[in-house]
Image (cartoon, rainbow, N blue to C red):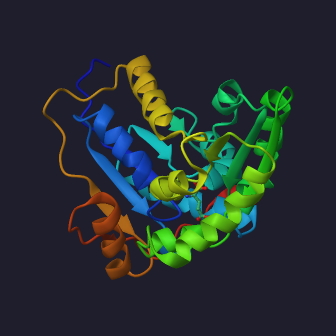
Amino acid sequence: MANNDTRPIGIFDSGVGGLSVLREIRALLPDETLIYCADSGHAPYGDKPQQVIRERSLELAEFLVRHDVKALVIACNTATAAAGRALRERWPSLPVIGMEPAVKPATAATRSGTVGVLATVGTLSSAQFAALLDNFGHDVRVVTQPGVGLVEAVERGELSADGTRHMLEAHLKPLLAAGADVIVLGCTHYVFLRELVESIVGPQVKVIDTGAAVARQLARKLDEKGHRAPAGEAKPVRFWCSGNPGSVAHAIDVLWGEHIWPDALPRSQVITPHTR
Ligand code: DGL
């Protein structure tokens, strides 16, 4: 197919954290029409069983596929670990772009030889993360820390509140004490706390995430298939959410900078065969 594919790209996350990926996609692919689903009514995913996250992810993906998306972006490390494979199996011809903590670039960037990874319990305890450490965690020491409570703070739009800072200080302390000079933000929500993280860790410590790399990977996939939209085709991002649209609208306001009232996702009605 030539590069005149006006179908939208579907992006989802457990909540509003994926907006940090959405903004990278918007910046790199300004002509593409984007649909974003925030599963805020079920956030956080990080402390839920993988099976539950898989079911939610399949349901959100199903919703996006019904909107005729040409590619799917899992803007969530936790959901990628739990459901990436299931989504690819379900829609084998649809490009599905997932994400994982930036351990590989972190190992290249460290000078102290110690890398700190801040991510959800779900991500850190996943087989995918274990495989990532197997592949890239040999020559450096990788210390991990679950960012308990941070997703909820970002969902509330509390990016600089005292409570958020105190939680972050507590989470970063063991990573710094271990000598980490690179901190990986392994959850898309945490990217919105980057400034706060940088103010705590100081200029000697590098803070990295994978949002821009995900956008580049999406662009590559679209190019491979000749599925780019023609110039000037983009429409405003369409937002859908579960949970309380008022709270999500507040978070979108803070994180995305626009007053947008998201549409409500249909209630769970998709029974998928993945539980077999
Ligand atoms: N934003 C998600 C991630 O990248 C998950 C947050 C959560 O719901 O726990 O891991």
Q: Quadrant of the C terminus?
A: bottom right
**Relative to 130, residue 174 above or below:** below
Count of labels in the image: 0
202 or 183, nearer to the observer: 202
Q: 107 or 252, which lies in front?
A: 107
Would you say 54 lies left or right of 236 here?
right
Q: Quadrant of the N terminus?
A: top left
The relative height of residue 30 versus residue 62 in the rendered view (above or below) is: above
Image location (x, y in percent) of residue 133: 81, 36
Question: Which residue occupies the foreground of this view, 113 or 79?
Answer: 113
- Residue 108 placement (x, y as % from top left): 68, 24
Q: Is residue 173 in view?
A: yes
- The residue sitting at 27% across, 57% down in the picture is 238
Left or right of residue 153, residue 106 in this image? right
- Give above or below for 68 relative to 275: above
Q: Quadrant of ligand 1?
A: bottom right
Q: Residue at x 61, y 50 (%)?
A: 77
Residue at the spot 57% in from the left edge and 57% down from the top edge:
200
Coordinates of residue 190 in the picture (x, y in percent): 54, 57
- Residue 273 in the image: state x and y as whole percent: 67, 58
Residue 50, quarter of the rendered image: bottom right
Question: Residue 226 occupies which quadrant of the picture?
Answer: top left
| Residue toward you, 171 or 157 | 171
Left or right? Give the position of 89 relative to 140: left
Regarding residue 45, the answer to whether it shows in the image is: no
